[in-house]
Image (spheres, rainbow, N blue to C red):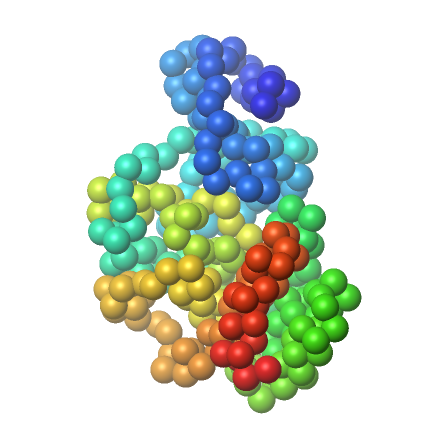
Amino acid sequence: MTSLVDRVAALLGVGVRSAMPLTGGDLSAVVRVLLADGSTVVAKGRDRAEDEADMLRAIAAASVPAPTVLAAAPGCLVMERLPADGRLSDAWSDLGAVTRRLHAVTGARYGWPVDFAFGPVPIINTWSEDWPAFWAEQRLLVFESSLPVDLARRVARIARDLPNRLPRRPAPSLLHGDLWTGNVLVHGRRVSGLIDPACYYGDAAVDLAMLRLFGQPSAAFLDTHGNFDPGSDGRLPIYQLWPALVHFRLFGRGYRPLLEQTLDASGG
């Protein structure tokens, strides 16, 4: 933590009074830093800090709340501290409105200007005009060599069938990319910020699938978002396969039941 705090002081040109580790840093060190001028910032030590900064700026440019980037350099991202004393259960409606604005921003193709990563797991974002091919090649099949043979065969079988399972050209919406409840900050009944993005352009239902993997958005969320087409529910398990694969790769066999459940739900 000491080296990260030193980086913060150097990047901002302000002395540091104290620092406290924050929860949620499974893949990156995250600290709250009290500066000598009395202000408080949040610092994150991670590879690709500058890429994450660009994603936060893209989210903010969509009129979506996100922490302001104060500094970004290799290995260190410094952001404003946002209020987060609320509960998502009180803010589902606002999250629906927030993600509606996010998904209204569209690109010409699927992907992102640069690749990204969840810790040691690469996130390939090569541009594509074919959504089923993008999801097969850059989200599912990249895990083939790291899976047990039986699971790899099931993933490959689903990937081969994606042209029959996914729309070929859904709107390439701006996605948060890792939209689980822990990455939504709430103040009162409003979303104060979306954090820890892994942005790219893709089917908006991907963010819905992630929200449903570890929680259950209320009807108010779906009502205020309003843009999920009637067929999106059928493809949510296919989109949940990717985070299930990521968790299996990162944290091991404890996540095998989750992966098998998503494979079962995907028909693979």
Q: Which residue is nearer to you in this view: 147 or 163? A: 147
Expressed as whole percent of the image width and height from the top left, the position of residue 41 reads 44, 26
Instruction: Locate the C terminus by quadrant.
Output: bottom right
Expressed as whole percent of the image width and height from the top left, the position of residue 130 reads 63, 77
Expressed as whole percent of the image width and height from the top left, the position of residue 207 reads 45, 63
Q: Is residue 79 visible?
A: yes
**Which residue is found at the position 63% from the left and 20% from the top?**
3
The residue furthest bottom is 164
Expressed as whole percent of the image width and height from the top left, the position of residue 266 reads 53, 79
The residue furthest right is 145
Q: Is residue 85 above or below residue 115?
A: above
Q: Is residue 184 above or below residue 75?
A: below
Q: In which quarter of the image is residue 28?
A: top right
**Which residue is found at the position 26% from the left and 42% from the top?**
86
Instruction: Locate the N terminus by quadrant.
Output: top right
Q: Residue 237 vs residue 191: left or right?
A: right
**Which residue is found at the position 62% from the left and 72% from the top?**
135
**Which residue is found at the position 51% from the left and 11% from the top?**
15
Q: What number of labels is visible?
A: 0
Q: Residue 221 vs residue 68: left or right?
A: left
Q: Quadrant of residue 226?
A: bottom left
Q: In this view, does 224 lie above or below 198?
A: below
Q: Can residue 128 be seen in this view?
A: no
Q: Which residue is nearer to you in this view: 204 or 6? A: 6
Q: Which residue is nearer to you in this view: 178 or 52? A: 178
Q: Is residue 135 above or below residue 94?
A: below
